[in-house]
Image (cartoon, rainbow, N blue to C red):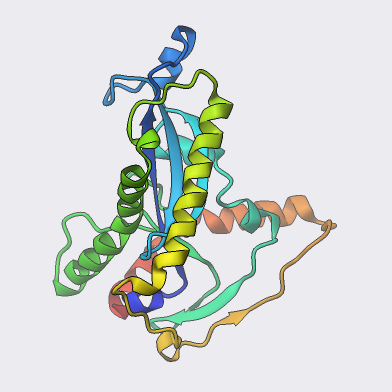
Amino acid sequence: MGNARGFPVMLGSIDCMHWEWKNCPVAWKGQFTRGDHGTPTIMLEAVASQDLWIWHAFFGTAGSNNDINVLNASNVFNDVLSGQAPTVQYMVNRTEYNMEYYLADGIYPEWATFVKTIPMPQGEKRKLFVERQESARKDVERAFGVLQSRFTIVRGPARAWHVNTLNNIMYACIILHNMIVEDERHTYNINFDYDNSGNELLSTDITTGPHPLFSTTYLQRRAHLRDRQQHRQFQNDLVEHI
């Protein structure tokens, strides 16, 4: 799907949603309330694709946080950091890459695993890139809207007293949402080019079991994941690719 839209090996768009917690205990209201919302909320981090399938969900962070704080606690990169995620090699603008990535909005950091928009773009190429990126990034926001429209319980204020109960409600709604998407996907008026447009994708084997140099390799993967220079180079290559 990502390659057909100009973003090879793109796993989806990532963003966060606030769910108002009406019955938040008084002692917790300070850590669950953010100024721009005014009421206690709990945050959901999710990754969604164009067909609104939710590939990743992390729920339970206090609403006083922002998207970056949630990212620091999220498990979205656990498989990558532990070496259990498969590596895919692909070419963009004659440069070889071996990382999967997400489309994100401006608040996210300049990591190699995020592709963000360009503020105040200059030139037709960059304007076209911004148009494509912002269009594709709306997928996760559309998924949030559909999730809330299907399940009134996550649209209105949460009335449960315990965070574990809210966790079960949110994850249950996401599972049911994905079941509906899987059942109705064939009716969507979306056509994808699944032949990768001639790009050759080489997937490596997944590493399992303990690694003798885990601490060293973990730090190397973490540095690669947060490489700002590669973030900028990859963004420029995508501009040319699109």
> At which x and y percent is residue 174?
48, 48
Above or below, comparing residue 152 to residue 126 in the picture? above
- Farthest residue toward the top? 27
Q: Which residue is found at the position 40% from the left and 88% from the top?
A: 197
Looking at this view, is 83 or 54 the one in front? 54
Looking at this view, is 55 or 176 the one in front? 176
Q: Which residue is found at the position 54% from the left and 25% from the top?
A: 163
Q: Is residue 58 visible?
A: no
Q: Is residue 218 visible?
A: yes
Q: Which residue is found at the position 70% from the left and 55% from the top?
A: 82
Left or right: residue 50 compared with residue 78: left
> At which x and y percent is residue 242?
28, 77
> At which x and y percent is residue 232?
37, 62
Q: Which residue is found at the position 21% from the left and 68% from the top?
A: 126
Above or below, comparing residue 131 to residue 201 in the picture? above
Left or right: residue 130 compared with residue 69: left
Q: Quadrant of residue 114?
A: bottom left
Q: How many marks?
A: 0
Q: Quadrant of the N terminus?
A: bottom left
Above or below, comparing residue 1 to residue 16 in the picture? below
Left or right: residue 81 compared with residue 22: right
- Farthest residue toward the bottom? 198
Looking at this view, is 40 or 8 the one in front? 40
Q: Quadrant of residue 129?
A: bottom left
